[in-house]
Amino acid sequence: MIGYGDRARTQCEVVRLFRETHPDLPPLNQGTISKIEAQYREMGHVRKVPSKRQAVVDDDTKLNLLLALEENPITQPVNWPVIKM
């Protein structure tokens, strides 16, 4: 059940209401509504959350970073990517 206040709707009703309200948009299915509802219940919002993937660093960049640290070990690597060896 999805709702606010006294008005609660089933997921099927939400799908139907969306299709009636937005006929020009691609239709949502119940699975999409279910995922949106689960995210809202877990996080309290449905904004897109940035992923927590590690940055991909090529070998040349790793070498340059290591050489820079060797030359000046006091350098603060605040914005440097995480290097996994």
Image (cartoon, helix red, strand yellow):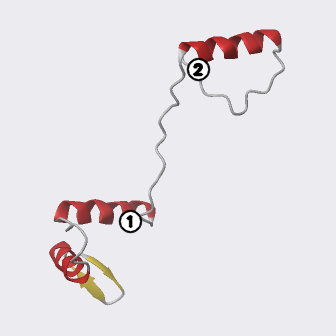
Q: Is residue 38 left or right of residue 74?
A: left
The quadrant in which the C terminus is found is top right
Crowding near the residue tagged with mark 2, few <14, some 14–19, many ≥20 C-alpha atoms within 10 Å: some
Q: Image height check: is 85 above or below 14?
A: above
Q: Quadrant of residue 66?
A: top right
Judged from the image, the secondary structure of the residue bearing numbered disc 2 is loop
Q: Amino acid at mark 2?
A: Ile
Residue 53 seen in this snapshot = yes
Q: Quadrant of residue 6?
A: bottom left
Q: Image quarter for residue 17?
A: bottom left
Q: Earlier in the sequence, mark 2 or mark 1?
A: 1
Nearer to us of marks 2 and 1 is: 2
| Residue found 51% across the figure and 31% down from its top | 54
Specify the quadrant that holds the N terminus. bottom left
Number of the label disc, if any, that sits on residue 83: 2
Q: Residue at x 54, y 22 (%)?
A: 57
> Could you say which is closer to the camera, residue 1 or residue 73?
73
Would you name the residue on which mark 1 appears? 40
Crowding at label 1, few (<14), some or many (≥20) Cα neighbours within 10 Å? few
